[in-house]
């Protein structure tokens, strides 16, 4: 999935070039390219599909020129992850009726890729033997308030547990409780299931979405599929797969994993996953002089710009050329609100 706008990374992430297409670490590879290469380690290239907004087709062809047009599913509108996944599952099932699938966002960072592959191979074995909806849960190491949490229920086998509850982005007090109990995992947003299991669950729990896509049976994988999607997709409700399905279904299983994961969803997560100076500052792209400044992250579009800072503690300073953001990292969850305010007052120019 690579169609999001990444508004929490504004102003570096913009509607015309969201965060999944950005090389944050100076490696020459965007987050999308890193994710695609990670998948290639154990999934053949012609088994990998990218689903994105139609506006990003050219960027994907630029960054992944080997991806064939028939491996690119272009959404005509943004409707969150449930319609996105429903369409992709129908498309894949039309090609392989017995397919098993992994669904992964394109903007995650994985640091221990061998352990990632081991966990996924075990997960594929499990979903192919059991009719379940499986999600990967990350062992937490701090009371993070920017992630969703999964409470583990009954132990099933090895690293697999039934899911007891989902909690979306708790406050600091509740996140501390979750960490102390040892029963909770971070929700990675990475899912595995068979196409049959997912479509059956959608029909049971999300009939409005299921019926809309079921009306296209016989069209998937044909020339008529594009017209059908262009006609029907925008009429779907905009809802996440977590809210629409995972929180309702009874056959949800979590695999507890520990392969070094971050969804790189915020400036704070980028700071924590980047090389830091002795003062805990992170510099992405400028000449930087700091005085009495600690724990802050600086992202500047112009590599030749000199930035001199005095007296900041735990801030994000992001200069995108036409937009400058200066914000306490403690308030970074408000960046979406800043973006909405800018759009209301100034239109789409700076979005």
Image: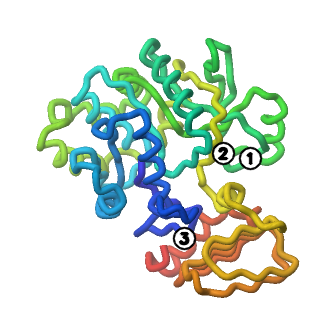
Q: Is residue 339 above or below residue 35?
A: below
Residue at 68 percent of width and 71 percent of height: 283
Residue at the disc numbered 2: 147
Q: For residue 144, which numbered disc appears in the image?
A: 1
The x and y percentages for residue 298 are 68, 73
Marks 1 and 2, Cα distance to the nearest angstrom? Answer: 6 Å
Give the alpha-carbon distance from disc 2 to disc 3, as whole Å: 21 Å
From the top left corner, tell me how far across and down residue 66 is, in percent.
28, 52
Which residue is at the front of the view, 103 or 114?
Answer: 114
Note whether 245 is above or below 196 in the view shown.
Answer: below
Locate residue 42, reporting x and y percent.
Answer: 42, 33
Q: Secondary structure at mark 3?
A: loop
Residue occupied by mark 3: 12
Describe the element under mark 1 as helix, strand or loop.
Answer: loop
Verify CB contact (< 8 Å) between mark 1 and mark 2.
Answer: yes
On screen, residue 93 versus residue 240, left or right, reads left
Image coords of residue 124 (percent x, y): 46, 23
Residue depicted at 55% across the width and 48% down the height: 108
Q: Do the numbered discs 2 and 3 sit on residues whose CB atoms are within 8 Å?
A: no
Residue 333 visible at all: no
The residues bearing labels 3 and 1 have C-alpha atoms spaced at a distance of 23 Å
Pick the residue in front: 117 or 318. 117
Residue 79 appears anywhere in the view:
yes
């Amino acid at each position: 999935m690579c169609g999001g706008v990444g508004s929490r990374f504004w102003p570096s992430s913009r509607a015309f070039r969201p965060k999944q297409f950005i090389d944050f670490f100076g490696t020459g590879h965007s987050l999308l390219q890193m994710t695609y290469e990670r998948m290639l380690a154990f999934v053949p290239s012609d088994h990998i599909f990218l689903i994105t907004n139609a506006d990003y087709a050219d960027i994907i062809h630029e960054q992944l020129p080997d991806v064939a047009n028939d491996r690119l599913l272009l959404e005509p509108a943004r409707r969150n992850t449930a319609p996105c996944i429903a369409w992709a599952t129908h498309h894949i099932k039309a090609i392989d009726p017995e397919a098993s699938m992994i669904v992964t966002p394109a903007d995650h960072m994985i640091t221990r890729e061998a352990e990632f592959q081991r966990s996924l191979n075990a997960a594929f074995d499990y979903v192919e033997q059991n009719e379940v909806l499986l999600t990967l849960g990350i062992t937490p190491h701090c009371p993070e308030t920017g992630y969703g949490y999964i409470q583990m229920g009954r132990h099933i086998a090895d690293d697999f547990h039934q899911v007891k509850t989902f909690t979306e982005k708790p406050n600091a007090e509740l996140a501390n409780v979750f960490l102390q109990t040892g029963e909770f995992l971070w929700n990675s947003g990475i899912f595995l299931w068979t196409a049959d299991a997912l479509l059956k669950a959608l029909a049971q729990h999300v009939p409005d979405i299921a019926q809309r896509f079921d009306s296209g049976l016989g069209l998937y994988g044909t020339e008529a599929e594009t017209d059908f999607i262009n006609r029907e997709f925008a009429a779907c409700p905009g809802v996440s797969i977590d809210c629409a399905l995972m929180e309702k279904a009874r056959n949800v299983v979590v695999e507890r994993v520990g392969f070094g994961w971050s969804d790189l969803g915020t400036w704070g997560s980028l700071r924590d996953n980047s090389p830091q100076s002795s003062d805990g500052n992170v510099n992405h792209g400028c000449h930087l002089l700091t005085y009495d400044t600690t724990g802050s992250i600086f992202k500047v579009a112009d590599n030749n710009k000199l930035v001199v800072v005095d007296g900041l503690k735990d801030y994000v300073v992001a200069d995108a050329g036409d937009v400058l953001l200066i914000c306490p990292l403690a308030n970074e969850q408000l960046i979406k609100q800043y973006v909405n305010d800018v759009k209301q007052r100034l239109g789409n120019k700076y979005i």
